[in-house]
Image (cartoon, rainbow, N blue to C red):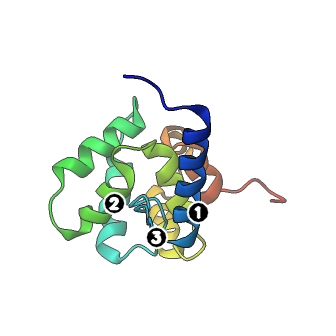
Amino acid sequence: MIPAAPSQSRAHSAGRRSQISSGVLALPRPRGRHVWLLDAAEIALLNGLIMAFRGGDFSGWLVDGLKAAGGPASERLRGYLVGSRAAQYCGRLFQYPANIALREDLVARIGPNSAARRRLLPSTIDKELFPAPGR
């Protein structure tokens, strides 16, 4: 295949950019990468998986658990976490200010003797649930 002449490719690129900026050529937005307010079923599923984790690859554990879970509670979580950096994106759900119930539920499940359980949490989630004094 013979490459296009430089002036043709620049003109094509400029035309494509103007189509994109004008909205003529609408590219689909990536799906599932925006945090949301989790409902009670999603909270129970996600925190149940986190509490069942006993060490190793947290992202792998989370993805496998979500793939095995059925029903509507797992659909949005699977769409958001599967195929991504699951531990990082899970942390983002905990950081989302509206997900107070998610954080409160996991803190209640962990309980007062939390040192061993906290060591298993990804650092993002641990810092969100148990902020250092003065933070």
Q: On the image, numbered disc 1 is attached to which residue? A: 18
Of circles 3 and 2, the one toward us is 3
- Give the alpha-carbon distance from disc 3 to disc 2, as whole Å: 32 Å
Residue at (54% x, 45% y) in the render: 118
Q: Which mark is residue 24?
A: 3
Q: How far across and how far down the image is residue 35, in percent?
A: 49, 66
Query: Label 3: few (<14), some or many (≥20) within 10 Å?
Result: few
Viewer-closest of 134 and 66: 66
Query: Label 2: few (<14), some or many (≥20) within 10 Å?
Result: many
Which amino acid type is shown beneath numbered disc 2? Answer: Leu
Viewer-closest of 111 and 33: 33
Which amino acid type is shown beneath numbered disc 3? Answer: Val
- Residue 64, relative to residue 39: is it above or below? above
Q: Is residue 112 visible?
A: no
- Give the alpha-carbon distance from disc 2 to disc 1, as whole Å: 36 Å
Mark 1 residue element: helix
Cβ atoms at labels 2 and 1 below 8 Å apart: no
